[in-house]
Amino acid sequence: MMRSPLPLFDGFIETPFEHRFQGLLRESWHARRWHVIVAEPGSGKTMGICDLRDEATRAAGMIGGRHFPVLAVTAPKNDPREAALGNLLLAALALGARGRWSERKYLLFELLGHYGVECLVIDDAHDLSMPHLIFLKELTDQLFLSFPSHPLGLCLVTAGRGASIPLKDVFDQPETMWMQFRRRLDGLHPYCRVASHTEGEVRDILLALEHIYRPSFPALNLQQWTGSMYTWLAHPLLDPQKSGRVLMDHLMKLVTTALRWSYAQAEVNVSPKHLEAAAEQLTLRRDKIHVIDVPNHKNEDENEKQESPEEPEEPKPKGKKEEKRGRKKRAPEEPENPNPK
Amino acid sequence: MTLEELERYFIRAIVDDYQQSWDRLRRQRRDVLWEEAVRQTGVPQYLGAPDDLKLLLMKAQNRKARSHAYRVHDRSRLSFQGNWYVCPGLLNRLAGREFEIYYDRRDISVIYLFVDGSYVGEGYCPAFMGQRISEWEAKAMRRADAVKAKAAASASADVRAQIQEEIEATKKQRRRAVREREKARQFDRQREEIHPAQVLETLADLAPPERESLRLSKATPDPEREYVAQSLAIRYREKEVD
């Protein structure tokens, strides 16, 4: 009997990366600062943003209507118009996008004040176009100059590897618009790179995962594999920059894959061979193409081949010639007309 | 004589010689005439920024002919007087645009770029490595380098000819080796069709092991000692209740 699949964790772990990342977002929110934040793809930026947004909304409460102190949207893709970003902001406020953009635009300024928005977080901000950035500046300027003044914190969260900082080349342009944008960025740390996990931090995460999966694995001990997991996940295929840091996405994939396989075999602890296999799958075999075909296709072919020599044994006609003739004639007809009537 | 010395002598010739001499037309020494004129009308003051004045006094160079105009190459560098100039972040924006170059002939390690009469930035010559190089020095260096390059090219020409001969000689051998390799590869590809599954498995076991760099290390538990682990906050997602 097949065992039901492992119930996977669907929540949020405040990892050391999230601690650093959310710390920066919080600073931006509370001090109304502007930052461009860069972290590697798969490090857990979006999870961190969602968690902070939910926490901020919960803390604001429902008294006096809904409040969204931290409003987060993903940058529009392949739509450079300011309306695209505006519509997403309206959607994040759970409002529809009806009517003309020219009218909705000014309504949006009012709504942001009405819903108590204190910090805007744009995820995947490297996809923002120049009209989007200009719109963000206009939006924040309008709110700042409104009465009473309503300054906004702004976090442009981007995905990037290596030394390059997305959006920096845009803000470095000599035009007045970008000079003003640069001036609004935080004076001390305008561009921040959030690093992923060290070996010690991987150990902390594995401890948290032990707590989470203990109900399914009574003798689970993930921490003892910290060194091996760190070595695998710092493999040049996963860490081409040789930063020596481990991404949360890779770590979770490795652990959950190994746990799934161990759970299917009704083991009480994760098996090292499953960990090794999961690590290989994640690194060396990640580009291997998985072919989905008819199950046991080869076996079926082989069976067919094996069956064919037995055919002459079934009926026993009179002569050899007739036998051959009869087989030649009957063979194609049989499958077409299986009904004797 | 250096350019600085020439400049110093030039100033001395004006101040100490020309200005001190007698002007027959006005019947007075020229420095006295200058001071009187300053008393009456004053010295016209330049009201712009000193840096702007410096730029205005520089030699401008602009090639109007489209085919010979200065252009940004590879969106990152600019060729001027046989040297490459770079300016991160600026030159990629100037790609395909017409611009003017201003420079001081006493130091061409930096050139100043103008678009439609307004200053947009400067380009630096990495080859001069931050040293002050005048236009004349740069020209002399280029001339000297060209002579040396020519000599080096002629010396290496013989070696190149020898290499080409060797290549020709080994071409046949290489072609044969490639043909044999390809044939072996094709034979190898037929293997799956030739042998049954268990034989293929045995053959795979006999094959040389994968390179060490392409394998991951074995899972080994960490040595037993006290590790300081921090417990992290875990937040479970609230399940919506109908």
Image (cartoon, helix red, strand yellow):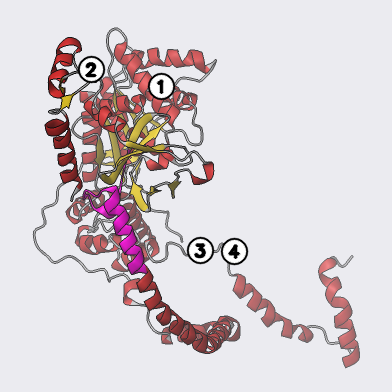
- Determine which quarter of the picture holds residue A310: bottom right
Rendering coords of residue B213 (x, y %): 32, 73
The residue tagged with tag 3: helix, strand or loop?
Answer: loop
Other residues around mark 3 within 10 Å, as few (<14) / some (14–19) / many (≥20)? few
The residue tagged with tag 2: helix, strand or loop?
Answer: loop
Whether residue B144 appears in magenta in the rendering, the answer is yes
The residue lying toward the viewer, choosing from A154 and B190, is A154
Q: Which amino acid does the dot numbered 3 rest on?
A: Ile
Which quadrant is home to the C terminus of chain A? Answer: bottom right
Residue A266 visible in the snapshot: no
Q: Chain of mark 4?
A: A
What residue did someone put label 1 on?
A93
Other residues around mark 4 within 10 Å, as few (<14) / some (14–19) / many (≥20)? few
Please give the name of the residue rendered at 48% of the width and 86% of the height, measured from the top-left corner. B165
As drawn, the residue found furthest toward the left would be B226
Q: Which residues are magenta?
A: B122-149
Other residues around mark 2 within 10 Å, as few (<14) / some (14–19) / many (≥20)? few
What residue did someone put label 4 on?
A293
What residue did someone put label 3 on?
A289
Q: CA distance from mark 2 to mark 3?
A: 80 Å
Instruction: Evaluate if marks 1 and 2 touch, with contact meaning CB atoms under 8 Å apart.
Output: no
Rendering coords of residue B208 (x, y %): 39, 84
Q: Please tell me which of labels 1 and 3 falls first in the chain.
A: 1
The residue tagged with tag 4: helix, strand or loop?
Answer: loop
Please give the name of the residue rendered at 26% of the width and 21% of the height, measured from the top-left corner. B48
Q: Are marks 1 and 4 on the same chain?
A: yes
Q: Are marks 4 and 3 on the same chain?
A: yes
Rendering coords of residue B67 (x, y %): 53, 45
Please give the name of the residue rendered at 24% of the width and 20% of the height, measured from the top-left corner. B46
